[in-house]
Amino acid sequence: MSHAVAPRTRPLGRLLQAGALVVVFAALYATARVSPAFEGTFGSIAALGFLLLAGMLAAQLLEMASLPHLTAYLLVGMVAGPHMLHLIDHEAVTNLQAVGTFALALIALAGGAELRVELLRPLLRTLGIATLVHAVIGSLGMTAVFLMLARFMPFAVNERWVVQIGIAVLWGVLSIARSPSAMLGVLAQTRADGPLTRYSLAFVMASDVVVAVMVTLAIALVRPLIEVGGSFSLQAIQELGHELLGSVSLGCSLGLLLAIYLWVGARQLLIVLLVLGFGLTEGLRYLRFDPLLTFLVAGFVVANFSAQAPKLMHAIEETGSVVFVVFFAVAGAHLDLPLLSRMWPIALGLAGSRVLITVIAHRVAMGWAREEPVVRRFGYASLFSQAGFALGLSAVIERAFPSFGPGFRALAVATIAINEMVGPVVWKVAIDRSGEAGKMATR
């Protein structure tokens, strides 16, 4: 998944881009204020075009500050969204979230296709150590931080201490969730390749599976602490096993079918990707399988058991260059800024603590694994971002524990918003300083 490296733009070109961005915002503002029909389907179509154009212009401008493109997309969505200028209303944001379904399918396919066995084999020991260390230090550390701050949280302050411990355990597990979409978005812009890129790609992708398992186990284990008369149940664990094994099996089958289709000619591949991204995703959810894991395995199968990975990656690059702009811009518009403004002190404390604990866990893991210097130095940088996966897990916890779930998820949304804005910037800086930016072109 890659974007072409843009040529250096002269100051006059930057000035023209800034002017064009102002004109685009002004045009949408005038249309939204003058036209009474600027809602429904028309409003969603207009919002789509605006986010695409404004996101690309803003990304070019923020290159002057060496910021990642997806930060520009997020900012455009935040500014134009329903919580600031209200150029895009809640209905349009909801309608455009369907783009996220397609984008996540492409992200998972591309991520799986990048996980080639010959690159992963030397990393297996390091990945095993890092996964164990981050799971233990990360979750326990954030559990302790949550307990220290619980007295400032309205949904936890009046609970019994055993209930607070149960809630804190859930928060600790949620805190080690990462964002594959943010990591891959930066890699798409920087065209990076090297030890740091490969380690980060493998670790973040694998961590989704680990965190999904840990959340399910945590819900089952803390239920007796939180609910009066609650008891441990194996049903949730059985459902998790069904979901994981089924997703892997379907992913293998899908990968083989994709490889055969690519081998025989791959005509109308864009249409096939659209069908997979929208139709198959909804079908997988209905069957209670994990779409992200399914597409990840499918991409892995295509890359490692066929010679068709270049065709698949080329199609994803062509499609994703447009889809990802809208995906991250809609994510920015969806951020609940009023909620963040109310809860920012606690959210900032939790986000900052998560950064510190992540760095500590990384140092411990790298000291044990004895990985290459560039990985030891910058390997933590891709681990700060959180986005849709963490939000989805917070929704699962909310449904599991309705007594405190709404307050828990509100705090999670506020904290994830901070991580979503800061994480990609840190990752982009690390890629630039590691010297791996632009190396994908020479592969």
Image (cartoon, rainbow, N blue to C red):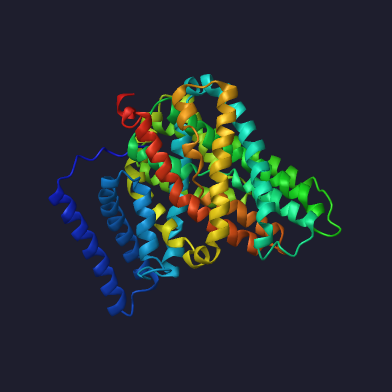
Give 217 or 250, whichever is nearer the viewer. 217
Residue that sits furthest to the left in the current view? 12
- Give residue 253's quadrant in the image: top right
Residue 66 x %, y %: 31, 43
Give 142 or 94, whichever is nearer the viewer. 142
Give 417 or 345, whichever is nearer the viewer. 345
Q: Residue at x 82, y 48 (%)?
A: 232
Q: Which residue is drawn at 61% across and 57% down?
A: 395
Q: Which residue is drawn at 45% across and 57% down?
A: 98
State whether residue 180 is above or below residue 43.
above
The quadrant of the rendering that contains the N terminus is top left
Residue 42: in sight, yes or no?
A: yes
Residue 335 x %, y %: 47, 60
Q: Is residue 12 left or right of residue 172?
A: left
The quadrant of the rendering that contains the C terminus is top left
Residue that sits furthest to the right in the current view? 229
Q: Is residue 284 left or right of residue 50?
A: right
Q: In this view, does 141 lie to the left or right of 263?
A: right
State whether residue 123 is above or below residue 254.
above
Q: Which residue is drawn at 44% across and 41% down?
A: 183
Q: Is residue 240 left or right of residue 279?
A: right
